[in-house]
Amino acid sequence: MAKKSEAKKVRITQKRSGIGRQEGHRRTIRALGIKRHQQSVVHELTPAIEGMIKKVSFMVEVEEVE
């Protein structure tokens, strides 16, 4: 098991609008901490975060951060 200091971090940026999307997609974006279009947030890559990213993968851009 990886220690916290060794955990991968990812930057998640919203690239597509939430207007007209399913309620679940909009709520997932909010749960990731993204409040507006083009905003970026940094999270440790956990199974929960991976699942949220997969759900809204067409709306976000993900890149690894050191």
Image (cartoon, rainbow, N blue to C red):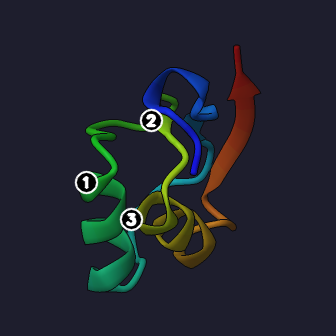
* Residue 6 appears anywhere in the view: yes
Does residue 54 appear left or right of residue 24 in this picture?
right
Between the residue at mark 2 and the residue at mark 1, the CA separation in whole angstroms equals 14 Å
- Name the foreground residue: 35 vs 1: 1
Residues at marks 3 and 2, CA–CA distance in whole angstroms? 24 Å
Relative image position of residue 30 (x, y in whole percent): 25, 54
Residue pictured at 66% horizontal, 66% vertical: 57
User: Badge 2, how many Cα within 10 Å: few under 14, some, many 20+?
Assistant: some
**Residue, disc 1:** 30
Decide if residue 22 is on the left or right side of residue 44: left
Q: Which residue is mark 2?
A: 43
User: As shown in the figure, which amino acid type bears the numbered disc 2?
Assistant: His
Residue farthest top in this picture: 66
Which residue is painted at 49% across and 55% down in the image?
46
* Residue that numbered label 3 is attached to: 19
From the viewer's perspective, is the residue at label 3 or at label 2 nearer?
2
Q: Nearer the viewer, residue 18 or 7?
A: 7
Nearer-N-terminus badge (2/1) = 1
